[in-house]
Image: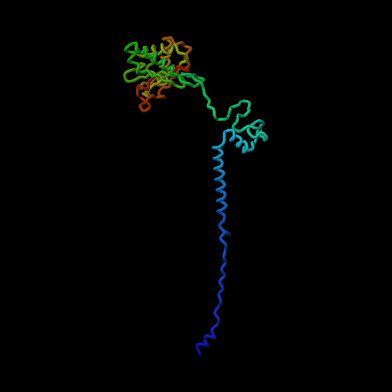
Amino acid sequence: MASAARGKNEPPRPIIVKKVTVVAGGHHGGAWKVAYADFVTAMMAFFLLLWLLGATTEKQRKGIADYFTPTLVKMREASAGSSAGLLGGSSITDVDNYPHKAGQTGTRALTIPRDATGGPKEGGSNIKRVARMNEALQKRLDATPLLRKLARQVRMVDTTEGIRIDLVDDADFSMFRLGTTLLTPEAMQLLRAIGDTVRPELGGLTVRGHTDATPWRTAGGANNWSLSAGRAEATRQALMRNGIAEDRFRRIEGVADRELLIKDHPEDPRNRRISILLMK
């Protein structure tokens, strides 16, 4: 009885109500569908473009280009575009009607005529001229055993300015006596052969003297500048004695040791040389 009385005296237990909200599955997370739709549309347009490029002719593609031609900042009558619009009826790939038509279709190559030797206007080289002069000079050098031996001292080079003939010293040969502007007998014979080769050719002449970097041991004002210029002048006079007209010479230059042939060895005898340039 006592326990039954206690049960009746206990307070009532609280009632808990649980509220459950059910949300339908399509109300959130739908942004990806819009992005996917945009992607599919772009892919469809891309494949449509590829199909149009492969299934249409050039004339049809020009018509499509006319339709999508953007508005130009500066309008010009009879230019590229639709016939009823501001572009006047032709495609942007057509030739414009400027005073000097350039034909900007981009489908034709420009051919510059030139012969085997070229020329100043065509920008060609002197390959045939060099070959002819080299052959003529070689015949003269083969005439005597001495000149045949000196052939190794001669170098003929085709340059942008003309044909340059270099007469190069070495340990066994020198164009001039040491420290002077006096030509050696061998050099005089070599210049005679070169003069006979250059004389029938057209073009002015430039003579340039080079020295090595060996310092002068004696005072008195002499130096490599004056020596190189003096040797160039001595070469010019020797060529004139062999039939080269005086008015063919354009410049006489002395550059001392500023244009070394063997840059790693400034005192190498091969840096001593005379350059004769037959200009174009």
Residue 221 visible in rendering: no
Asked where in the image residue 240 lies, by quadrant, the reply is top left
Which color mode does the image show?
Answer: rainbow
Q: Is residue 95 left or right of residue 271?
A: right
Label total for image: 0
Asked where in the image residue 107 lies, by quadrant, the reply is top right
Q: Is residue 235 left or right of residue 78?
A: left
Q: Which residue sits at x=55%, y=37%? A: 55
Give the percent coordinates (x, y) of residue 249: 47, 14
Give the percent coordinates (x, y) of residue 212: 37, 23
Q: Is residue 163 above or below residue 59?
A: above
Q: Is residue 41 left or right of residue 256?
A: right
Q: Is residue 236 above or below residue 106?
A: above
**Among all residues in the image, which is located at the extreme front?**
55
Give the percent coordinates (x, y) of residue 104: 58, 29
Q: Which residue sits at x=57%, y=47%? A: 41
Q: Nearer the viewer, residue 21 or 96?
A: 21
Residue 114 visible in rendering: yes
Q: Nearer the viewer, residue 106 or 56?
A: 56
Q: Nearer the viewer, residue 193 or 269?
A: 193
**Among all residues in the image, which is located at the extreme right?**
84
Q: Which residue sits at x=38%, y=12%? A: 193
Q: Is residue 129 above or below residue 4?
A: above
Asked where in the image residue 232 lies, by quadrant, the reply is top left
**Among all residues in the image, which is located at the extreme bottom?**
1
Give the percent coordinates (x, y) of residue 111: 52, 24
